[in-house]
Amino acid sequence: MVASSKPVVKTDLAGQTLVTLRTLTEENPASLETYLKLGGYAALKRVVTEKVKPTDIITEVKTSGLRGRGGAGFPTGLKWSFMPRYFDGVKYLVCNTDEGEPGTFKDRDIIRYNPHQLIEGMAIAAYTLGARVGYNYIHGEIWQDYEIFEAALHEAKAAGYLGENLFGTNFSFDLYAVHGYGAYICGEETALIESIEGKKGQPRFKPPFPASYGVFGKPTNVNNTESYTSIPWIMQNGGQAFADLGVPNSGGTKLFSISGHVEKPGNYEVNMGMPFTELLALAGGIWKGRQLKAVIPGGPSTAVMPASAIMGATMDYDGLSKARSSLGAGSMIVMDDTTCMVKALHRLAYFFYEESCGQCTPCREGTGWVYRVIDRIVKGQGKMEDLDLLTDVSNNIAGRTICALGEAAATPVLSFIKHFRPEFEYYIQHGKSMVDGK
Amino acid sequence: MLSPEATTKIDYELTKYPADQRQAAVMSALRIVQTERGWLSKESITEVAQYLGMPEIAAMEVATFYNMYDLSPVGKYKVTICTNISCMLRGSDEIVSHLQNKLGVGFNEVTSDGKFCLKEGECMGCCGGAPLMHVNNTEMHEFLTTDKVDAIIEGLK
């Protein structure tokens, strides 16, 4: 099998800084040939054959300022230092390519357009952490992209970049692709581990953390796809060069998935700290010449921002937290002035209700209550006290569950009502939307 | 009984895991059997569990937990439309009503000729191509318009 994706839709790459999607400039971006032409696998070969000390690699990753790109933003180098160095048995490496939070679709482009850089990044991480086996867990619905990635794995193995005794050394690493089958919760790292083991994807209590008790009960390091894919560039160009691409506290580039009401939805890889207005311009601005109303900047688990709050913000961890939201996974959902916020929240509430794994009572019951209350508002049967009820129920989900889905489910409810309360009040009073009159 | 083709594919998946962790392959095994038989009956799930040497109830838990397993017949073509926020903002409601009118079925119903079943999907992680739909869990169709939907449906014979 040879990895080859469908010909790339030639997008305008101006204004972008391609680190994790650097093969996008080429005709056949997913192939091994293309990746080697761009200097691929050189960093892996160097660290393995020169026997670079794992602690030096971790220091380099810490210097880069790379933070977990899956949404939590935890420093990657620090996470790596939690893995036990001496362990008598197999340690595991896991990549989280399970994108199921609405608006998130960046890792899909990595596995279909630049799979080898992810493989190289995971191999470097495996060398650093002493992991013998790795799994890349891929979102269920992107079957065609899963096949591209699996073909790339076979290609890398045949070329001697995966498998036994790489480059004639005693370093060995086997990497496999694993396919999800439709569960948002498996994006949570311990649910993902349960799923790899062939179980329902229900999050585990932490501690113990995966670094001490992960896949099959063994020490496991879990990172996001974009995080691993940044590693070869960092090892080639140095941690400081990566940090310098971004701004203090937010090193490097970030892939932003932009969906909703823009002229050119898609992924844009830019330096951290880019002003929101510039990023919006790259995506062609608001479609149909309309006005911006609101943006969910990092996926629905991050607070919605009215246009006035995001227009002056920069796209990095601190920039968005100063503007009272967060970067999350960089999944920007853009809404124009024809959007009814009540109906938008109605859809999101249904999503969290549908996708709650059912393990913790506050989330299982609470997401159902939230959905039913918003549903009755949308059907014209809302009462004014429902707004306080929604706030109350949401506050009783957040912080009372095993995993972060509790907060994720509460955030949209709380932030939509906070910023767009008059729209909700109008809907309850008139039984129809203030925006579209329906 | 599982077909030789199915067991060959399941055996390939088993190579990804330690020999004493056969249950890890259950998600793939259920997918492989569902793809071959069209849907997962209770008997199919039992056969998978037996092949992997795991309790039937544990395989059943997996089959009922993940959205893409079908525990009742879905016709020759299962068409799953995403209606989540990014798709909704770009007109998935219109695509849904067009498909429902065209095929004469609602969500979770199969056409009388047994050919199509419509499902409402949750986010498929391809929101840049919204609105979008998925056919038989494998083919992704993005940037849908009603004309494009007509052409896709025509192509499914």
Image: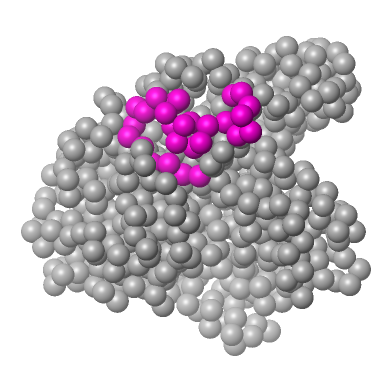
Q: Position of residue A216 (x, y in %)?
A: 42, 58
Q: Position of residue A94 (x, y in %)?
A: 39, 54
Q: Is residue A393 magenta?
A: no
Q: Is residue B47 left or right of residue A135?
A: right
Name above or below for residue A67 compared with residue A116: above
Q: Is residue A428 left or right of residue A103?
A: right
Frontmost residue, B103 versus A116? B103
Q: Position of residue A91 (x, y in %)?
A: 31, 57
Outermost residue on the left side: it is A50
Q: Residue at x 45, y 59 (%)?
A: A8
Q: Which region of the structure is painted magenta?
A: A266-292
Q: Is residue A283 magenta?
A: yes
Name above or below for residue A13 compared with residue A149: above
Frontmost residue, A192 versus A294? A294
Q: Residue at x 49, y 37 (%)?
A: A283
Q: How was the colour assigned to the protein in this rendering?
A: one colour
Q: Quadrant of the N terminus of chain B?
A: bottom right
Q: Residue at x 34, y 60 (%)?
A: A26
Q: Position of residue B117 (x, y in %)?
A: 80, 62
Q: Is residue A157 visible?
A: yes
